Image (cartoon, rainbow, N blue to C red):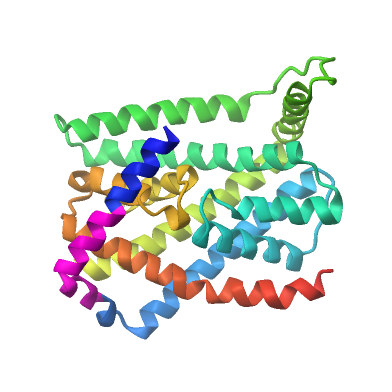
């Protein structure tokens, strides 16, 4: 499945590149965005970085590790940069290396922390996606029907996991993979048993989602004068979910594919989708200067 997604992503990137080569006017939109809009979007991304940093701080506190706010921002910055410029969401690997080296934080603990972030993000985005599809209501559209089924499955599965406390069997410690999975279950239960921690994490994930939605609203309204909130929230949901499953830097390919797939629901043309992808990633690259600066400046102060 991973190879298929990567292959489709490569063909899609090549296709977009050829399209832009033949239609260079699509890039003109970048010059039409005011500096104030760019600064506002960068500010929104900075708030998103802070929220992600606080998420890391709170979930680590649940495991008894109380890092400083500056350290949390440092971890958030290296995670953002790793996910934007490197494949396989490498930001999480940088975070693991740092936490393991400084605090002896083990991989099952980080895996449960990362898995919980995935599950709560899927829960929120699939719920919002379902609500948006209900109000957009495109009966008979095959993409609409498939989207409902996919979102419904994700919502049910993520809800089950958020409420699930795993039974941890004894023994099996001599077999490495069984021991690792056993520790993963133990650490997952650390989170799910702590309801206050769960509420905090869901709240931070919701704030994060709303910030992404504000960014999407500003860009889509600016480019295409479309301000249907259900369309914006639906686009936001598939964008966030694609970032979780992407194996490429900045979700190149997979996100584009999902947006193309949903273009009828979003009422966007192929040209609209390409323009939207260009603007979003241009803003992300511009913003990367801030976490890049924070990574370099905070590295010495948190040692």
- Counting the numbered discs, the total is 0
Tell me which corner region of the image, top left, top right, bottom left or bottom right, holds residue 222. Answer: bottom left
Magenta includes 16? yes
Question: In the shown orientation, is residue 246 left or right of residue 48?
Answer: left
At a point 80% along the width and 50% down the height, the residue shown is 100
- Give the quadrant of the N terminus: top left
Residue 139 in the magenta stretch? The answer is no
The x, y position of residue 98, in whole percent, is 76, 56
Q: Residue at x 80, y 58 (%)?
A: 67
Q: Quadrant of residue 22?
A: bottom left
The quadrant of the picture occupied by the C terminus is bottom right
Position of residue 274 measured from the top left corner of the image (x, y, whole percent): 24, 60
Q: Is residue 49 visible?
A: yes
Along the line of sight, the residue nearer the viewer: 88 or 283: 88
Question: Is the residue 177 above or below the residue 208 in the image?
Answer: above
Quadrant position of residue 184? top right
Question: Which segment is the magenta one?
Answer: 13-29
The answer to whether one can see residue 230 in this image is no
Please name whichever residue, 190 or 114, is drawn nearer the observer in this view of the structure.
114
Q: Is residue 96 placed above or below 167 in the rendered structure? A: below
Magenta region, mostly helix, strand or loop? helix
Q: Nearer the viewer, residue 233 or 82?
A: 82
Q: Is residue 290 left or right of residue 229?
A: right
Q: Is residue 98 above or below residue 275?
A: above
Q: In the displayed structure, would residue 102 be above or below residue 167? A: below
The x, y position of residue 75, in whole percent, is 69, 61
Rendering coords of residue 73 (x, y %): 68, 65
């Amino acid at each position: 499945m991973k190879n298929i997604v990567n292959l489709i992503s490569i063909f899609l990137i090549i296709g977009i590149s050829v399209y832009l080569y033949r239609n260079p006017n699509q890039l003109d939109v970048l010059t039409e965005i005011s500096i104030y809009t760019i600064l506002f979007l960068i500010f929104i991304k900075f708030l998103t970085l802070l929220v992600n940093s606080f998420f890391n701080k709170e979930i680590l506190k649940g495991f008894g590790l109380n890092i400083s706010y500056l350290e949390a921002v440092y971890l958030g910055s290296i995670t953002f940069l790793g996910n934007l410029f490197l494949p396989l969401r490498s930001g999480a690997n940088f975070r693991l290396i740092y936490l393991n080296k400084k605090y002896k934080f083990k991989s099952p603990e980080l895996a449960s922390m990362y898995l919980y972030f995935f599950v709560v993000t899927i829960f929120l985005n699939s719920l919002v996606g379902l609500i948006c599809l209900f109000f957009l209501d495109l009966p008979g559209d095959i993409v609409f029907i498939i989207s409902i089924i996919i979102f419904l499955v994700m919502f049910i599965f993520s809800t089950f996991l958020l409420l699930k406390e795993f039974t941890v069997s004894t023994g099996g410690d001599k077999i490495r993979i069984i021991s690792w999975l056993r520790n993963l279950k133990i650490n997952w239960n650390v989170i799910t048993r702590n309801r206050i921690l769960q509420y905090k994490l869901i709240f931070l994930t919701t704030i994060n989602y709303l910030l992404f939605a504000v960014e999407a609203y500003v860009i889509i309204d600016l480019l295409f004068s479309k301000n249907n909130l259900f369309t914006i929230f639906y686009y936001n949901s598939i964008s966030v979910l694609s970032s979780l499953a992407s194996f490429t830097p900045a979700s190149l390919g997979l996100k584009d594919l999902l947006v193309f797939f949903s273009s009828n629901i979003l009422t966007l043309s192929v040209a609209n989708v390409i323009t939207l992808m260009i603007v979003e990633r241009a803003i992300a690259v511009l913003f990367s200067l801030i976490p890049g600066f924070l990574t370099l400046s905070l590295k010495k102060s948190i040692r």
